[in-house]
Amino acid sequence: EPQAKIWLNTQSWAVLSGLGTQEQQRQAMNSVKEYLDTDLGIKKIHPAMTTDYPTKEENLTCYNKGCGENGSVFCHANTWAIIAECMLKRPENAWKYYHQLLPMVAQKTAGAERYKAEPYVYSSNIFGPESDKFGLANVSWLTGTAAWSFYTASQGILGVKPDYDGLKIDPCLPKELEELTVMRRFRGSEYEVHILNQAGDEKGEIQLTVDGKQIDGCVIPADAAPCRHRVEAVIR
């Protein structure tokens, strides 16, 4: 029986690193959806490894199947998959992966008695489907997932992110998010960004208006002196 046939990090970082063609990158993330996605998040590897693969001394085999690095939903690594889907302009996948991993959503899906962790803080990992404790949240509070999830939500899904030349507005929104406003301080200036999503589940083309004037592209040039701006971003 094959073991560790697919690893989440290699798939997502094939996109984040820019390696491969667009078709190869899409196939990498299609395989994530096919083999690794669960209702409680994306598991790290599939299938999980047994205690003698590749050797009995291998660190990963110290974990039972579905635990820790050996096939759990490793929350930190999920965020990179979400960013990869944003880069591929697939908001439906990005939003599914982000939403299902939210602690309050994951707890509700698994059930509080099985999840056994707070619904307001990320855990390091959630036991995967190859474990008889599938849905158990493990090591809450102690994880980089919270910081990466904020980065993922603000710069990936909402798409408001710093760029060398200015502030870039490039959302990747699902149809559920039809309209929203983001406040962002950037290089001393304040930006009130109102986003209207008319593209549904598609990435769409963005049209930017800054202080009443339409600009080309999706980067707002940085100010020489601090200012306050009103930005209208329409995704068509």
Image (cartoon, helix red, strand yellow):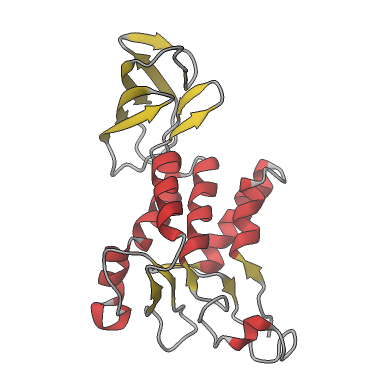
Q: Along the line of sight, which residue is nearer the eye, 225 or 88? A: 225
In the rendering, at what x and y percent does residue 214 appear? 39, 10
Q: Residue at x 33, y 24 (%)?
A: 191
- Hey, which quadrant is residue 50 in on the image? bottom right
Instruction: Judge left or right: residue 119 versus residue 45.
Output: left
Residue situated in front as seen by the camera: 57 or 142:
142
Q: Position of residue 185 (x, y in %)?
A: 36, 29
Against 65, residue 184 (above or below) is: above
Quadrant for residue 30, please give it. bottom right
In the rendered image, residue 166, in percent from the top left (x then y), is placed at 49, 22
**Rendered view: 3 above or below 10:** below
Q: Residue furthest right?
A: 55
**In the image shown, does 107 or 119 lie closer to the viewer?**
119
Q: Nearer the viewer, residue 74 or 35?
A: 74
Residue drawn at (43%, 36%), measured in percent from left and top?
Answer: 159
Q: Is 63 drawn above or below residue 84 in the view shown?
A: below
